[in-house]
Image: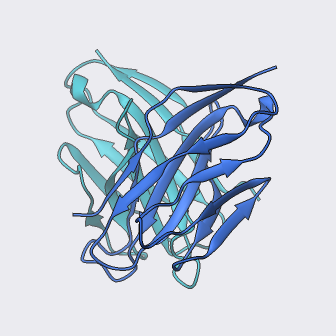
Amino acid sequence: NAGVTQTPKFQVLKTGQSMTLQCAQDMNHNSMYWYRQDPGMGLRLIYYSASEGTTDKGEVPNGYNVSRLNKREFSLRLESAAPSQTSVYFCASSDGTGGLWEQYFGPGTRLTVT
Amino acid sequence: GDSVTQMEGPVTLSEEAFLTINCTYTATGYPSLFWYVQYPGEGLQLLLKATKADDKGSNKGFEATYRKETTSFHLEKGSVQVSDSAVYFCALFLPFSGSARQLTFGSGTQLTVLP
């Protein structure tokens, strides 16, 4: 049982390049989330998916797109990377029942945009 | 809007010292409250939670009590260990809020415990 996995662990992009961050969970959770973590700002929600086939914007969605490929996988795409997107990105999942608020996090992707 | 305010870090303590990390919140409803911990190089893990006023969450020697009258959820541990060195996040969740299913996090408090 791997929990939540993310790839890649590290990435360096030049301004204007695109990339997709991958996330998968094996806990059969309905809901999945993408956060970014910046120094002194905690975690901020980028997008979430309450269930397979649905996605919604979070607090900071500009510059990002997401795809809920199936129940297990939720990807985050940067179409044209900017230095302001340098951050650590975390994927999380939770079940849709009584434990909705208990989110399980992946190990993170550290992204640098130069 | 909903928000969480944590005491600024970093906090440095000697092993076996008493720990308090303050957390206060602002919310329009009756939130559930959480403490998450992030060890170096890892993602966040749920440490403890409380879902209604006067509930006490506890885990691994850490405790926090949901105080509605002071809108607080301070984290405490009686005797910290070097292995407790991590970043601690306070968070709230409003299950019926317009923003649906998101946690609102504080900015995090870095704790370093020295041997």
Image coordinates for residue A80, horizontal then vertical, percent: 20, 33
Residue placed at 40% from the left, 41% from the top? B107
In the figure, B41 relative to A22: above or below?
A: above
Residue pictured at 25% horizontal, 26% vertical: A17
- Where does the C terminus of chain A fall, quadrant-wise? top left
Q: Is residue A32 visible?
A: yes
In the rendered picture of this protein, how many numbered marks are placed on residues? 0
Quadrant assignment for the N terminus of chain A: bottom right
Find residue A11 and report its horizontal and vertical position in percent: 45, 25
Q: Colour of chain B?
A: blue
* Color scheme of the displayed model: by chain
In-front residue for pair B113/B18: B18
As drawn, B15 above or below B93:
above
Say which residue appears at 51% left-offset and 37% top-offset.
B109
The chain coloured cyan is A
Q: State left or right for residue A12 relative to residue A4.
A: left
Viewer can see residue A70: no
Q: Position of residue B1 (x, y in %)?
A: 21, 63
- In front of the other: A28 or B23: B23
Which residue is situated farthest in the front direction here? B69
Q: Is residue A102 above or below residue B85?
A: below
The residue nearer to you, when weighing A8 against A100, is A100
Left or right of residue B55: residue B98: left
Is residue A20 depicted above or below B54 in this figure?
Answer: above
**Residue A22: % across, % down:** 48, 47
